[in-house]
Image (spheres, helix red, strand yellow):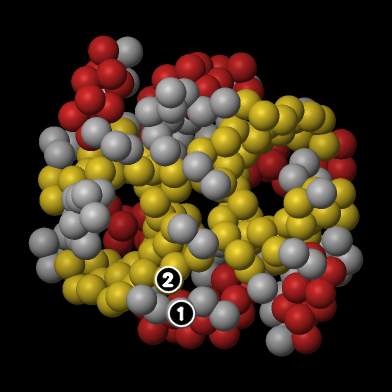
């Protein structure tokens, strides 16, 4: 059985959140279902549903966090691929057992649930997030 | 109308090496693998829920994927939205004045596909696909 069951969201780093929301709603007809200021992470984000997943457009609100460095070095673009798992602790145990580096301890996700990041060194260059959503 | 994320494309050096993580560790089944000559890649689609992860390995030094790999290394490359009618979707996109790479749909791994220009979408290479 697959460890990851679906794409939860794809996060896109942008310089101007309002401009990006305007682009994605005008170009593709997407709607914003939620906007959040995540002060703890130094980002502002907007979630735009597509099928059973979301596009997350986000912009850093501080000058020196990893997304701000990403924007300065590489410009706007895809930043995180988030995959949903049923049991985060079991997934982390399996991955750790196979020598995969899980880069942060589980933390609470915006919108509910818990998440971890895997090192891009283990995922062929992808900042991969695993997220466990709360039972609905 | 864009229905869902059909796939997220990831550029890798070698498919077999990437299978160790995406197929064997994450457990995602490979349901299609093929050479797509006009994109200069060997590509594989791995199923995840209602979507796919597409792994792309360049097969020559001149294609866009090879240049991406050389410039930025392995990593996230594009996102593909599924549509019922790729030709109509592309026409509507061009009518809005959105910059595109393909002015007419062409054959891709997923079906008939087209790419929009990353400049038009905040640095994201976006693909439409009509599954065949």
Which residue is pictured at 57% across the width and 60% down the height?
B4
The disc label shown at residue A76, or none: none
Evaluate if marks 2 and 1 touch, with contact meaning CB atoms under 8 Å apart: yes
- SS at badge 1: loop
Residue position for label 2: A48
Which residue is pictured at 44% across the width and 47% down the height?
A7
Marks 2 and 1 sit apart, C-alpha to C-alpha, by 6 Å
> Does residue B50 appear left or right of residue A60 in this picture?
right
Residue B6 to residue B54: above or below: below
The single residue placed furthest to the front in the displayed view is A136
What is the x, y in percent for residue A83?
38, 43
What is the x, y in percent for residue B67?
68, 42
Residue position for label 1: A31
Residue A41 to residue B122: above or below: above
Residue A62 visible in the current orientation = no
Which residue is pictured at 43% across the width and 23% down the height?
A1
Residue A1 visible in the current orientation = yes
Judge if badges 2 and 1 mark residues of a common chain: yes
> Does residue A13 appear left or right of residue B43 in this picture?
left
The subunit letter for the residue under badge 2 reads A
The N terminus of chain B is located in which quarter? bottom right
What is the x, y in percent for residue A96?
25, 18
Q: How many numbered circles are shown?
A: 2
The subunit letter for the residue under badge 1 reads A
Which residue is pictured at 58% across the width and 42% down the height?
B52
Looking at the image, is mark 2 or mark 1 earlier in the sequence?
Answer: 1
């Amino acid at each position: 059985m697959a460890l990851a069951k679906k794409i939860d969201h794809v996060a896109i780093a942008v310089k101007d959140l309002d401009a990006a929301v305007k682009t994605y709603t005008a170009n593709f007809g997407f709607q914003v279902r939620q906007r959040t200021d995540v002060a703890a992470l130094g980002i502002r984000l907007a979630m735009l549903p597509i099928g059973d997943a979301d596009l997350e457009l986000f912009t850093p609100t501080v000058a020196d966090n990893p997304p701000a460095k990403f924007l300065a070095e590489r410009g706007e673009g895809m930043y995180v691929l988030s995959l949903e798992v049923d049991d985060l602790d079991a997934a982390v145990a399996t991955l750790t057992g196979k020598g995969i580096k899980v880069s942060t301890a589980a933390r609470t996700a915006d919108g509910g649930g818990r998440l971890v990041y895997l090192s891009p060194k283990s995922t062929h260059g992808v900042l991969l997030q695993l997220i466990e959503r709360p039972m609905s | 109308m864009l229905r869902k994320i059909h796939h997220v494309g990831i550029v890798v050096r070698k498919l077999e090496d990437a299978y160790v993580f995406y197929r064997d560790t994450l457990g995602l089944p490979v349901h299609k693998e093929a050479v797509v000559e006009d994109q200069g890649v060997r590509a594989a689609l791995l199923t995840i829920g209602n979507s796919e992860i597409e792994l792309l390995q360049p097969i020559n030094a001149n294609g866009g994927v090879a240049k991406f790999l050389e410039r930025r290394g392995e990593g996230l490359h594009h996102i593909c939205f599924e549509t019922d009618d790729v030709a109509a979707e592309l026409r509507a996109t061009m009518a809005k004045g959105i910059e595109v790479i393909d002015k007419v749909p062409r054959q891709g791994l997923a079906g008939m596909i087209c790419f929009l220009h990353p400049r038009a979408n905040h640095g994201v290479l976006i693909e439409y696909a009509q599954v065949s």
